[in-house]
Image (spheres, rainbow, N blue to C red):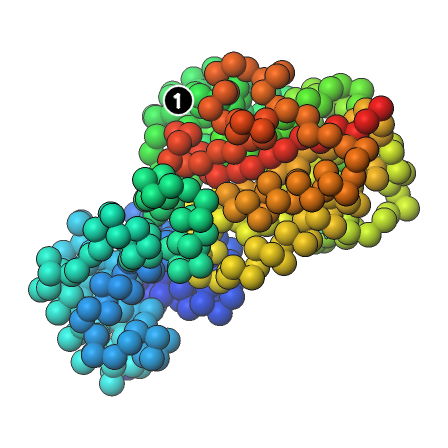
Amino acid sequence: MIRPSQQDARYVAYIVLLRVADGAYSDLALDSELKRSALDQRDRRFVTELVYGVLRLRGRIDFALGCFCNQPLPRLQSEVQWLLRLGAYQLLEMDRVPAHAAVDATVELARKLGLASLTGILNGVLRALDRGRDEIPWPQPQQIRPYLERVCSLPTWLAKEVMRLLPNQQARALGEALAQPARQSVRVNTLKTDRDSFLDLLCAAGHEARRCTFAPEGVVLERRGEQRLQGDEEGLYQVQDEASMLIAHLLDAQPGQRILDACAAPGGKTTHLAALTANQAEIVAVDKSPQRVELIEQGARRLGCNRISAHVWDMTLAADFLIPESFDRVLLDAPCSGIGVLRRNPEGRWNKTAADLRQLAALQQRLLAQTATLVRPGGLLLYSVCSFSHIESNDVIDSFIAEHPNFTLDPLPAQLPAHWASVFAPAGTLRTYPHCHEGMDAFFAARLRRRA
Ligand SMILES: C[S@@+](CC[C@H](N)C(=O)[O-])C[C@H]1O[C@@H](n2cnc3c(N)ncnc32)[C@H](O)[C@@H]1O
């Protein structure tokens, strides 16, 4: 038997997918397998597209495969399911891969993996899919739930959640946006450069980039690619979605203040707060995960943020190093379902359930109650999540306010630029959606003020 090699892009993609199916994070598994491989840039891009594409569109692909399989896909051996998905993704979504190459390479990969007994089913199903692709009974856009599940690739629980929250037309638009790859953007590190100088640097290196509409330090990269940009080692930028960049602006952080970032890792917003206060505020960053706290420290060093102290702590518990009522500003960027950033963590669709939303909301409420004790009278507490579920957003805030009469909702739009109006909900909270806000991730934020 000829063994598949690390030089075979489809093999590398297959291994990453199996690791993700076993519980690994797609970005970490992809990164480590690409490092072990001997693939060139082109093949690395191919693997990346295969992995993210298969995970993102798994619902769509499984529906298509189901039309040509004699038995339900979940009944097949896991290896066959992932090989079929890999082949089907190339057939249905990658125009540049000829159909015969998609089928033959999948069958050949199975043979090299020692799965010769499965080549018949792989060959049969993929060829049938190729021949019958025009007859697949895709649901019409008006059939909203089947459309969200089979075309937009949302699991049933998430399709239901989207339909509960939004009228059909918007639900469809959100589903379609979540099925696309995410826009790539970076935050220019204003401690070291300014946006126009950084754009000049990118343009001189041949990148197509433009200013973000909302975030004043944001740059959108027109072409996707996973390579580092100019100024990476010097800390001129931080990869960050534009919606995430808006959050630090909402805290109204000022030089001279004491600021707590209560769930801070990997530190995207902590380092942004340092930049917005020109390293003139004392920033305490806390996270429960020791490995992730190291990322805050590394990021702070790279970006030149020298007033951040990072600590490992479970913020549902009182900490003796955090004095009650001692912070002017507290950011709680809480752990959440991440359904607003599904385009970046595509496996999140398949490893979460509706029950997770309620469990996370309970954790979010505990974190809010604990962090609230640290805000000084008159100070601000900003709650944010990368989720569009009301269970993790409005409901958490409503019950917090009901239980904490010493806090009031502080409407956001008042001090923020007029052209941000569309990112605010009528209640004065922030709510972004990829289909409404130029492809930004879906975020929610509410600002709470402690009565003086
Ligand atoms: C949404 S992420 C934060 C992202 C971060 N603010 C940024 O912008 O880079 C949520 C973080 O909460 C942390 N976390 C979860 N439960 C926690 C707890 N009980 N106490 C402190 N941190 C917690 C997780 O480790 C995770 O890093």
The structure residue drawn at horizontal position 60% and vertical position 40%, both measured from the top left corner, is: 394
Residue 250 falls in which quadrant of the image? top right
Residue 371: x and y in percent read 78, 41
**Percent coordinates x, y for residue 391 in the rendering:** 57, 49
Disc 1 designates what residue?
210
Q: Is mark 1 within 8 Å of ligand 1?
A: no
Q: Is residue 422 left or right of residue 295?
A: left
The local crowd at label 1, few if under 14, some if 14 to 19, many if 20 or more residues have their Cα within 10 Å, is some
* Residue 227 sits above or below residue 315 on the image: above
Q: Work out whether 75 lies above or below 393.
A: below
Residue 110 visible in the displayed image = yes
Amino acid marked by disc 1? Arg
Residue 1 image offset from top left, x and y in percent: 28, 82
* Quadrant the C terminus occupies: top right
Q: Determine the residue positioned at 77% across, 43% down.
A: 403
Question: Which of 10/134 is in front?
Answer: 134
Q: In this view, does 263 lie to the left or right of 356?
A: right
Direction from residue 118 to residue 40 in the image, left or right: right
Q: Nearer the viewer, residue 241 or 103?
A: 241
> Residue, x 87% and y 34% (percent of image)?
325
Is any atom of residue 33 visible in this view?
no
